[in-house]
Image (cartoon, coloured by chain):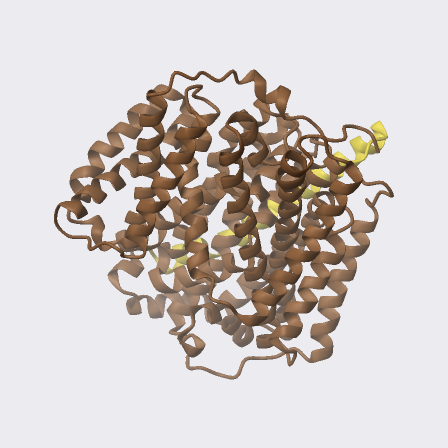
Amino acid sequence: MSALGLSAYILIWPVISAAVLAMLIVALIRDMREARRKGEEMI
Amino acid sequence: MQDSELFQLSGLTAVLLLVGFYVTTFLMSLTIRQKNENVDGYMVSNNAIGFGLSAASMIATWIWAASFYASASAGFRYGISGPIHYGLWGALMILFIYPFGRRFRQLAPKAHTLAEVMHARHGKSSQLIMAVSNLVGSCISLMVNFTAAGALVSILSPLSFVQGVVIAAVGVLSYTIWSGFRASVMTDFAQLAAMIISAVVIIPIIFFNVGGTEMLAANMSTLTVQQADFFSSEAFLRQGAPYLVAVLAYAIGNQTIAQRLFAVREDLIKPTFISATIGYGAIVIGLGMLGLLALFIGLEPAGGNLNNIIPQMASAYLPPFAIGLFFILVVGSLSSTADSDLSALSAIVMTDIYGKNLARGRPDPARMLFWGRMTMVIATTVGVIFASLRMDILVMLVFVGALWGAIVFPVIMSFYWDRISNKAFTSAVISAVAAFALLRFELVSLQGPLAVLFELLASVGGGIVVGLMAFGFFGKTTGMVLGALTMAVLAPFSVGFLRDYVVLISSLTAYGVSAIVCVAVSLRSSERFDFDLLNERVVAFQGEQT
């Protein structure tokens, strides 16, 4: 594996982690809105 | 790089970070507190938690403090593929259990614990095997997480080990005790967000501060052939394969995962588990890369202890604010797992000890809730005492792992094959644990025909692992064909080879023996189980009443 490829291999994981967090936050906001609209508790 | 003094936060900063973290989580838990807590909600919420919260909770629970240290150790020891052989297999096991999880939910939608479903399927002995293994397992996990808190605090601040243990224990108990599982799920989201933000900041800073791409190019030659190989057989056989087999058992047997499975909205099980797989893998593999970077720069772990790799890297290559983030990262990971363990322990005592046994199926909700909260207090106390005494728990840990490995096949098949009886389940587990103990503690000498016998049993175990995975995703025929093919391919390679890999052969043998005994005893039985009975027998304790 080249040094550049290895750098990408090391740095890709924080990028994926950030993308997952963004997705979870969007999903949480949607769930909160839906729960408020239905007058239900989320948990 | 040689050993150097680790950077320490001031005592005041460490206390402020810990108190700030736990006060914030406590205040969050107050927002969902109910005057009269519903016992079902205390254990599994409303069985309809949304995607965001449930996926975050799965990831946060699956990641414990040891995940970072073990992944970094794998990167340091095995090189480029090391973190993959820790994080990827752990992640895939989350994915692997979702087809079975959907089946569990479909058959017993109102379940609180997997042991409770086993009680409905088989009776007391299989229920107690599940319950006791989880009680011991969660107490061990609690102790390990409190120990991690003590170690972190004593390494990165002037506070003592015991002070760190006590602060973490009191902090976790304070926000979990009132609302149980509901508080655990809610705070998991914030804890996971803190963990991810910390990881996203820390990993690139350390990468560039150790020299980035130029350093990698300059030091590539210092790696061994196996360490530089992305497809290292050494990394797979020593790290990946034993871990895969162990974590599969953990995924199926552990109540913290089962509890989330019973809590998420049923149609969201698949996206929840897929997202948790990706999230867990990215965070744990990413932090494992710090071990790989340590290998490249030639770091010498303080005291020869690989658990010191991440604190040393953080201390040497992070600015003070990022060390504070690292502190929160570890506290978040250990707290989210510890609160899940407390919730799991309370659910098992409430359901399997009190509800199904002491109260004989007619529990008083108020008393049930009291026992759940008392369980948390007692478990926390035990965890603090054991952590403070730094007790050696390796033997206990190995036994719990063996027990969970032995139950994987009987548990899964109990939900698909109507011939499996309580006798088949129990005898399979006992014989598999006995075979595991013989090998793992080297009570028999692995030589001659005996070694060949165990290598063949381990080959069967390998086939069972592959067969179960294929069965979950592609159905019975594919599962049986791939399982049989794996056994046939593995057998000739295993003989004369697997005896040198004690951890792997003992784990695989547990799978093989439990499957063989379970099938053999079941085939002799004329019993047939009606799966519709599970839904009738496993019901809510309190329903919608509050």
Q: Nearer the viewer, residue A1 or B188?
A: B188
For chain B, what colour was chosen? brown
Q: Nearer the viewer, residue B252 or B113?
A: B113
User: Where is B509 relative to B382, above or below?
Assistant: above
The percent coordinates of residue B349 (x first, y second) are 64, 44
- Left or right: where B137 falls relative to B164: left
The percent coordinates of residue B86 (x first, y second) are 42, 52
- Residue drawn at point x = 62 percent, y = 21 percent: B535
Q: The N terminus of chain B appears in which quarter of the rendering?
A: bottom left
- Residue drawn at point x = 43 percent, y = 38 percent: B407
On the question of residue B431 being in view, the answer is: yes
The percent coordinates of residue B145 (x first, y second) are 58, 60
- Left or right: where B461 falls relative to B173: left
Number of marks: 0
- Left or right: where A36 falls relative to B420: right
The percent coordinates of residue A33 (x first, y second) are 80, 34
For chain A, what colour was chosen? yellow
Determine the residue located farthest toward the bottom in the rendered image. B5
User: Where is B145 relative to B358, above or below?
Assistant: below
Residue B114: quarter of image? top right
On the question of residue A23 being in view, the answer is: no
Residue B6: quarter of image? bottom right
Residue B493: quarter of image? top left
Determine the residue located farthest toward the left in the rendered image. B448
Q: The C terminus of chain B appears in which quarter of the rendering?
A: top right
- Residue drawn at point x = 61 percent, y = 61 percent: B383
- Left or right: where B1 falls relative to B500: right
- Residue drawn at point x = 52 percent, y = 84 percent: B5
